[in-house]
Image (spheres, grey):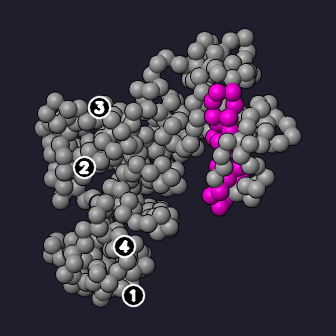
Amino acid sequence: MSSVTIRNVSKSFENNLILSGFDEEFKDGEFVTLLGPSGCGKTTMLRMIAGFEKPTTGEIYFDETLISSDKVFVPPEKRGVGMVFQSYAVWPHMDVFHNVAYPLIIAKKDRASIRQKVARVLDIVHLSQYAERYPNQLSGGQQQRVALARALVAEPTLLLLDEPLSNLDAKLRESMRFEIKEIQRNLGITVVYVTHDQTEAMAMSDRVFLINRGVVQQKGTPEEIYRQPVNQFVADFLGKVDFVKGEAGDGRIRLRRTEVSLPYAGEKQGAVEVAVRPENITMSKEKGDIEGTVTVGYYLGDTSDYRVAVGDIALRVITDGRLFRAFKPGDRVFLTLDDFMVYDDDGSLEEQLKIYT
């Protein structure tokens, strides 16, 4: 296994600062995800770990070995890292066996060793029966497993994955998440995974680093950053959320443009932003704290997704899919907020949520 220590790493291209002050250790056997919108710096960080980019400032260590700094640079081929890219990058003129064997052939390993290692890794990714097939005879998911097997065959202690599932359809992406996680558990290797998909990050990670505009906004377990987001950007990027402006004081929060007043035992005073996740709202026709009117509902199978007008604002409510017929547009309903988060309304919300600019 291998740990990765990143000390005060920054990266600029000309005058454009891409990543700033990244300072962290990824532990042996840990599954770490770098999560964030396009252009936030997560792939740049992965490429610096792999050796495809040099940090502008800072140092990177594998265990206790310095592999990148202003004076030291170990090239990619000597870092012992396996990497899987967004594109499968499998050789179309080679069958599965030779695609997977390629790194060992380049390293001039003996034939017996190559056969043994390729057979083992093909078994791990469930492709043993496809060893003689060519890429055009495989599905997208099978080609991605070929790329994964090729990254694993040289027995790396560190595996880097750059949005490897983004070209797959939704159902295949879901199954591949669990396959990759299971392989990582069984092999005990350290994985650094890059994605913009929060569901992937939540399902697979031991820890998540959520990055925006080159700066880590929050790090922690999926549950920690989902339940306790440190700012509005984190709350918005991880999951669904509505933000409502309010005034806090005297143990209450009064939501603007409504007649709603919520009990509040926190320390914030004055202008606030109240963040409410739609699954944390209970909707009923009989009782609740907030009265509203259903404006629209969407049936999604396992869930039902509603919009409810409360005064001049709209709240999103997600309920069990079996309850879809129970609520119709125009129905008067009562809402209970089982949980909500409160942030200072300092004018930064709109700036924080410009995640694609």
Q: Kindly identify which numbered label has been placed on residue 140.
A: 4
**Residue type marked 3:** Ser
> Magenta residues?
299-320
Viewer-closest of 157 and 354? 354
Q: Position of residue 71 (x, y in %)?
A: 12, 38
Side of 249 relative to 188 (left or right): right
Asked if 1 appears above or below 45 in the picture, the reply is below
Q: Are marks 4 and 1 in contact (CB under 8 Å)?
A: no
**Residue type marked 2:** Arg
Query: In the rendered structure, does residue 319 fall within the stretch colored magenta?
Result: yes
Q: Secondary structure at mark 4?
A: helix
Asked if 75 appears above or below 104 in the picture, the reply is above
Badge 2 density bin: few <14, some 14–19, many ≥20, Cα 10 Å: some
Reading the image, the residue beneath label 1 is 129
**Residue type marked 1:** Gln
Asked if 330 appears above or below 81 in the picture, the reply is above
Farthest residue in the right direction? 286
Q: Position of residue 207 (x, y in %)?
A: 48, 46
Disc 1 to disc 2, how far (Cα)? 33 Å
